[in-house]
Amino acid sequence: MSRFTVNDTPLAGLKQVQRQRLGDARGFLSRLFCAEDLAAAGWTQPIAQINHTHTAQAGTVRGLHYQQPPHVEMKLVSCLRGSVFDVVVDLRAGSPTFGRWHAVHLNDDNSLALLIPPGFAHGFQALTDDVQLLYCHSAAHAPQAEAGLHPQDEQLAIAWPLPVAGLSPRDAAHPRLIELASTDLNPLPDEGNSLPRSRERAGVRDGAWHQQ
Protein backbone atom coordinates (compact mmCIF):
# COMPACT_ATOMS: atom_id res chain seq x y z
CA MET A 1 0.00 0.00 0.00
CA SER A 2 1.39 3.39 -1.00
CA ARG A 3 2.32 5.85 1.71
CA PHE A 4 1.78 8.77 -0.69
CA THR A 5 -1.30 10.56 -1.95
CA VAL A 6 -0.53 12.34 -5.21
CA ASN A 7 -2.68 15.23 -6.41
CA ASP A 8 -2.65 17.20 -9.64
CA THR A 9 -2.07 20.95 -9.72
CA PRO A 10 -3.18 23.58 -12.24
CA LEU A 11 0.15 23.05 -14.07
CA ALA A 12 0.10 19.73 -15.95
CA GLY A 13 2.82 17.37 -14.74
CA LEU A 14 3.47 19.22 -11.49
CA LYS A 15 2.31 17.03 -8.61
CA GLN A 16 1.59 17.68 -4.96
CA VAL A 17 2.64 14.72 -2.85
CA GLN A 18 1.15 14.06 0.59
CA ARG A 19 3.21 11.73 2.77
CA GLN A 20 1.49 9.42 5.24
CA ARG A 21 2.95 9.49 8.74
CA LEU A 22 2.96 6.33 10.82
CA GLY A 23 3.27 7.27 14.45
CA ASP A 24 2.68 6.43 18.07
CA ALA A 25 3.65 7.85 21.45
CA ARG A 26 7.34 7.51 20.57
CA GLY A 27 7.18 9.62 17.41
CA PHE A 28 6.61 8.85 13.72
CA LEU A 29 8.04 7.44 10.51
CA SER A 30 7.56 9.33 7.24
CA ARG A 31 8.75 7.92 3.93
CA LEU A 32 10.36 10.67 1.86
CA PHE A 33 10.80 8.77 -1.40
CA CYS A 34 9.76 5.48 -3.00
CA ALA A 35 10.51 4.87 -6.68
CA GLU A 36 7.72 2.33 -7.05
CA ASP A 37 5.06 4.51 -5.46
CA LEU A 38 6.06 7.71 -7.26
CA ALA A 39 6.41 6.18 -10.73
CA ALA A 40 2.72 6.79 -11.41
CA ALA A 41 3.27 10.46 -10.54
CA GLY A 42 5.95 10.71 -13.22
CA TRP A 43 9.18 9.94 -11.39
CA THR A 44 10.71 7.33 -13.69
CA GLN A 45 14.46 7.92 -13.27
CA PRO A 46 16.97 7.02 -10.56
CA ILE A 47 17.88 9.61 -7.97
CA ALA A 48 21.18 11.13 -9.08
CA GLN A 49 21.67 13.57 -6.21
CA ILE A 50 20.16 14.53 -2.84
CA ASN A 51 20.72 18.03 -1.45
CA HIS A 52 19.93 19.54 1.94
CA THR A 53 19.64 23.33 2.30
CA HIS A 54 19.41 25.67 5.27
CA THR A 55 17.98 29.19 5.09
CA ALA A 56 18.61 31.26 8.20
CA GLN A 57 16.15 34.16 7.99
CA ALA A 58 12.45 34.52 7.23
CA GLY A 59 11.73 36.54 4.10
CA THR A 60 14.72 35.18 2.21
CA VAL A 61 13.95 34.18 -1.39
CA ARG A 62 16.01 31.62 -3.28
CA GLY A 63 15.47 31.08 -6.99
CA LEU A 64 13.99 30.79 -9.44
CA HIS A 65 16.34 28.03 -10.64
CA TYR A 66 16.39 25.40 -13.39
CA GLN A 67 18.89 23.54 -15.57
CA GLN A 68 19.04 23.98 -19.31
CA PRO A 69 18.97 21.08 -21.79
CA PRO A 70 20.49 18.54 -21.98
CA HIS A 71 20.80 18.62 -18.17
CA VAL A 72 17.10 19.02 -17.35
CA GLU A 73 16.00 17.38 -14.12
CA MET A 74 13.08 16.33 -11.99
CA LYS A 75 12.97 17.46 -8.36
CA LEU A 76 11.11 16.27 -5.31
CA VAL A 77 11.15 19.07 -2.72
CA SER A 78 10.30 18.47 0.96
CA CYS A 79 10.50 20.76 3.99
CA LEU A 80 12.17 19.22 7.04
CA ARG A 81 12.13 22.28 9.30
CA GLY A 82 10.22 25.54 9.34
CA SER A 83 7.86 26.72 6.61
CA VAL A 84 8.24 27.93 3.02
CA PHE A 85 6.17 29.38 0.20
CA ASP A 86 7.34 27.02 -2.54
CA VAL A 87 6.95 28.35 -6.09
CA VAL A 88 7.16 26.69 -9.51
CA VAL A 89 6.97 28.44 -12.92
CA ASP A 90 6.10 26.64 -16.16
CA LEU A 91 8.87 27.28 -18.73
CA ARG A 92 7.89 24.53 -21.17
CA ALA A 93 7.76 26.01 -24.65
CA GLY A 94 4.38 25.26 -26.20
CA SER A 95 2.67 24.70 -22.85
CA PRO A 96 -0.78 26.32 -22.50
CA THR A 97 0.34 27.45 -19.03
CA PHE A 98 3.73 28.81 -20.12
CA GLY A 99 4.76 31.62 -17.75
CA ARG A 100 2.21 30.68 -15.10
CA TRP A 101 3.24 29.99 -11.52
CA HIS A 102 1.87 27.78 -8.78
CA ALA A 103 2.81 27.78 -5.10
CA VAL A 104 2.23 25.60 -2.05
CA HIS A 105 3.05 26.03 1.61
CA LEU A 106 5.50 23.30 2.61
CA ASN A 107 6.36 22.94 6.28
CA ASP A 108 7.63 20.47 8.85
CA ASP A 109 4.11 19.56 9.94
CA ASN A 110 1.94 19.13 6.84
CA SER A 111 4.01 16.33 5.20
CA LEU A 112 3.65 17.85 1.74
CA ALA A 113 6.18 17.78 -1.10
CA LEU A 114 6.25 19.00 -4.69
CA LEU A 115 7.27 16.70 -7.53
CA ILE A 116 8.58 19.05 -10.23
CA PRO A 117 9.09 17.68 -13.76
CA PRO A 118 11.65 19.02 -16.26
CA GLY A 119 10.83 22.37 -17.78
CA PHE A 120 9.92 24.24 -14.60
CA ALA A 121 11.81 26.89 -12.63
CA HIS A 122 11.70 26.50 -8.84
CA GLY A 123 12.21 28.81 -5.90
CA PHE A 124 10.90 29.53 -2.43
CA GLN A 125 10.54 32.11 0.29
CA ALA A 126 11.33 31.19 3.89
CA LEU A 127 8.33 32.01 6.09
CA THR A 128 10.20 31.20 9.30
CA ASP A 129 13.79 31.36 10.46
CA ASP A 130 16.00 28.27 10.17
CA VAL A 131 14.29 26.56 7.24
CA GLN A 132 15.64 23.24 5.99
CA LEU A 133 14.67 21.69 2.66
CA LEU A 134 15.53 18.31 1.17
CA TYR A 135 15.81 17.92 -2.62
CA CYS A 136 15.88 14.68 -4.59
CA HIS A 137 17.21 15.25 -8.14
CA SER A 138 17.03 13.02 -11.19
CA ALA A 139 20.19 14.61 -12.64
CA ALA A 140 23.39 15.82 -11.04
CA HIS A 141 24.09 19.51 -10.67
CA ALA A 142 25.66 20.80 -13.88
CA PRO A 143 27.20 24.27 -13.32
CA GLN A 144 27.44 24.91 -17.06
CA ALA A 145 23.68 24.41 -17.38
CA GLU A 146 22.61 26.62 -14.46
CA ALA A 147 19.86 29.07 -15.35
CA GLY A 148 17.27 31.13 -13.55
CA LEU A 149 14.39 33.56 -13.68
CA HIS A 150 14.16 36.75 -11.65
CA PRO A 151 11.85 36.15 -8.66
CA GLN A 152 10.46 39.70 -8.87
CA ASP A 153 9.65 39.59 -12.57
CA GLU A 154 6.73 41.99 -13.04
CA GLN A 155 5.13 39.74 -15.66
CA LEU A 156 5.07 36.78 -13.31
CA ALA A 157 3.81 38.93 -10.42
CA ILE A 158 4.47 36.22 -7.84
CA ALA A 159 2.58 37.06 -4.64
CA TRP A 160 5.41 36.53 -2.16
CA PRO A 161 3.84 36.53 1.32
CA LEU A 162 6.66 38.57 2.92
CA PRO A 163 8.82 41.41 1.65
CA VAL A 164 11.51 39.85 -0.54
CA ALA A 165 14.85 39.74 1.25
CA GLY A 166 18.22 38.05 1.06
CA LEU A 167 18.45 37.66 -2.72
CA SER A 168 21.90 36.45 -3.71
CA PRO A 169 23.77 38.50 -6.34
CA ARG A 170 23.29 35.60 -8.75
CA ASP A 171 19.52 35.41 -8.24
CA ALA A 172 19.16 39.21 -8.46
CA ALA A 173 20.90 39.07 -11.86
CA HIS A 174 18.60 36.45 -13.39
CA PRO A 175 16.70 37.61 -16.51
CA ARG A 176 13.00 38.34 -16.73
CA LEU A 177 10.74 35.97 -18.63
CA ILE A 178 10.61 38.26 -21.63
CA GLU A 179 14.41 38.12 -21.87
CA LEU A 180 14.76 34.35 -22.06
CA ALA A 181 16.11 33.03 -25.32
CA SER A 182 14.32 30.09 -26.92
CA THR A 183 17.40 27.94 -26.28
CA ASP A 184 16.81 28.36 -22.53
CA LEU A 185 13.44 26.62 -22.69
CA ASN A 186 12.29 23.02 -22.78
CA PRO A 187 9.72 21.90 -25.36
CA LEU A 188 6.81 19.87 -24.10
CA PRO A 189 7.43 16.11 -24.45
CA ASP A 190 6.59 14.88 -27.94
CA GLU A 191 5.60 18.36 -29.00
CA GLY A 192 8.58 19.05 -31.25
CA ASN A 193 10.63 22.19 -31.05
CA SER A 194 8.12 24.95 -31.66
CA LEU A 195 9.37 27.65 -29.31
CA PRO A 196 8.07 31.11 -28.52
CA ARG A 197 10.19 33.79 -30.09
CA SER A 198 12.96 35.24 -27.92
CA ARG A 199 12.26 38.54 -26.14
CA GLU A 200 8.54 38.54 -26.84
CA ARG A 201 5.75 38.16 -24.36
CA ALA A 202 4.94 34.48 -24.82
CA GLY A 203 1.52 33.80 -23.39
CA VAL A 204 2.23 34.91 -19.81
CA ARG A 205 -0.78 34.18 -17.67
CA ASP A 206 -1.95 35.24 -14.26
CA GLY A 207 -0.32 33.23 -11.50
CA ALA A 208 -2.23 30.80 -9.37
CA TRP A 209 -1.33 29.45 -6.00
CA HIS A 210 -2.60 26.79 -3.68
CA GLN A 211 -2.29 27.35 0.05
CA GLN A 212 -2.13 24.47 2.52
Image: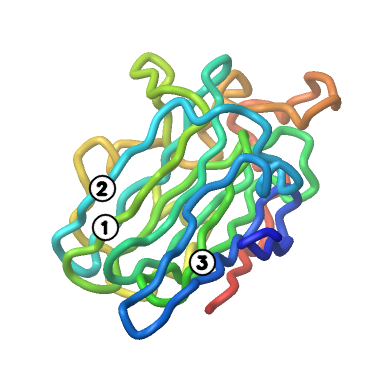
Mark linked to residue 112: 3
The total number of labels drawn is: 3
Q: Position of residue 159 (x, y in %)?
A: 46, 70
Q: Position of residue 153 (x, y in %)?
A: 45, 52
Residue at image location 68% in from the left, 57% down from the top? 205
The relative height of residue 207 versus residue 69 in the rendered view (above or below) is: below
In three-dimensional space, the C-alpha distance between marks 2 and 3, rounded to whole angstroms, equals 17 Å
The kind of secondary structure element at disc 3 is strand
Q: Pointers 2 and 1 in contact (CB under 8 A)?
A: yes
Left-right relation of 80 to 32: left
State how the image is colored: rainbow
Disc on the earlier residue, 2 or 1: 2
Task: Kindly give the residue lying farthest to the left in the view shown.
Answer: 56
In this view, the residue in front, 116 or 95, is 116
The relative height of residue 100 versus residue 22 in the rendered view (above or below) is: above
Q: Residues within 10 Å of mark 2 (few under 14, many from 20)?
A: few
The kind of secondary structure element at disc 2 is strand
Q: Position of residue 191 (x, y in %)?
A: 85, 27
**Amino acid identity at mark 1:** Gln
**Amino acid identity at mark 2:** Thr
In three-dimensional space, the C-alpha distance between marks 3 and 1, rounded to whole angstroms, equals 14 Å
**Amino acid identity at mark 3:** Leu
Q: Pointers 3 and 1 in contact (CB under 8 A)?
A: no
Task: Kindly give the residue lying farthest to the bottom in the view shown.
Answer: 25
Disc on the earlier residue, 3 or 1: 3
Q: Position of residue 154 (x, y in %)?
A: 47, 56
The kind of secondary structure element at disc 1 is strand
Residue at image location 24% in from the left, 63% down from the top? 131
Residue denoted by label 1: 132
Residue denoted by label 2: 53
